[in-house]
Amino acid sequence: MKKQKNAIVIGGGLAGLIASISLAQMHIPTIVIEKRTYPFHRVCGEYISNEVKDYLVKNKLFPAEHDIKEIDNFILSNEQGKAARCQMQIGGFGISRYTLDHFLYEKAKLNGVVFIHDTASSFSFDGDFFTVQLLSGEALQCSLLLGAFGKRSNLDRTMERSFFSRHSAYMGIKWHLKTEWPADAVGLHYFEGGYAGVSCVEGDKVNFCYLLQQDLFSEYGSIDKLEEQHLSRNPALKAVLENSQRLFNKPLVISQVNFSSKKTVENHLLMCGDAAGLIHPLCGNGMAMAIQAGAIAAREGARFLQGSISREEMERTYQKQWERAFNRRLIFGRYAQRLMESPKAFSLALQVAMRSPYLLKKTVGLSHGKPFL
């Protein structure tokens, strides 16, 4: 196997795609290992903060031809039907992962990125080069390895990452619907044991995605019963569920959604996207974080491969930049999650938000970052 100054990205989600395109644009030979073939759906809120829009436009990665839904209003409701509303500070846009990931995949190929549809089962590092072992038996070598393998992967188990052994009480469920929903608004609707996000994506579809405690699903035994008998206690959710056409034969479901802290660099592997840290979905900013993290990882990785900095400097700088960009909002997300888990505390917070849309606007702004270029 020829050893060269090249990069491998494990995982072809938003962070992995953005990182691979950025590296390829800097003339670094790049491979993405992604087990699935595009396009495909993912459990995701499908709202992207405008903080990364200028970056996407500048790098010709903004999918303007795909009927983007501009979103600048926020709605928050509880089970009693009370709701607070505000206009967001910077807002965002709605697009499905099915469409966006495929769009970026095509962009990556045009930039020379090579895709291998396989699973990385393990990797090793000899001080200069990584060797990545695939399930097919093939082994690949690279100078730079990025981990963009999502919320929970077998590689996390192989690496014995600390969060992997901790049980998580949460699961996520997603539908695409045909229903009435204001195109310029994202809704966050509380129900006991969880909350649901509602927003429009391309093609006049509505993304309906919710996080709930796994025990709640076990109590009802089926998603249909859960939605009819529990989620529908919230009038806003009842209106969405009763007046909609489901566009999937069955919902997308993900279990063991873990919000524990993670290391951004492990075994010299730069983590980005959900592999580095998962923000609570109620903040609606995981997609923007993934895009930004992928770009930062590629930039620092390129500096290392070009000989401008050492591997140690690259790892240290990437970790600092990641923490500077995301730590504050991750902390905010943890506090917001605790608030949503307490019906009384959430009810009081909603009353304050109803009286002061300005305060709600400022609070929502804490989950967004500064414009990124």
Image: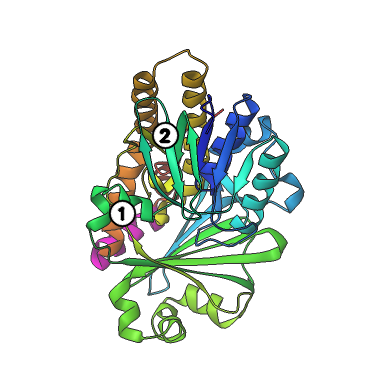
Dots 2 and 1: beta carbons under 8 Å? no
Could you tell me residue 263's position as x and y percent?
A: 30, 39
Outermost residue toward the top in this view: 308
Q: Nearer the viewer, residue 359 or 105?
A: 105
In the picture of the structure, the residue carrying the numbered disc 1 is 157
Of residues 346 and 215, the one drawn nearer to the viewer in this rendering: 215
Q: Could you tell me which residue is drawn at 37 percent across and 23 percent down?
A: 317
Please report the residue visible at 54 percent of the width from the left and 79 percent of the height from the top. Answer: 241
Give the foreground label among 2 and 1. Answer: 2
In-image side of 340 versus 108 (left or right): left
Q: In this rendering, would 313 be left or right of 339?
A: right
Against 65, residue 211 (above or below) is: below
**Residue found at the very far right of the displayed protein:** 65
As drawn, 273 above or below 42: above
- Marks 2 and 1 sit apart, C-alpha to C-alpha, by 18 Å
Q: Residue at x 49, y 19 (%)?
A: 303
User: Which picture quadrant has residue 190?
Assistant: bottom left
The image quadrant where one finds the C terminus is top right
Res 371 seen here: no
Please say whether residue 135 is one of the residues in the magenta stretch: no
The earlier-in-sequence mark between 2 and 1 is 2
The residue type indicated by label 1 comes to Arg
Q: Residues within 10 Å of mark 2 (few under 14, many from 20)?
A: many
* Residue 130: assigned label: 2
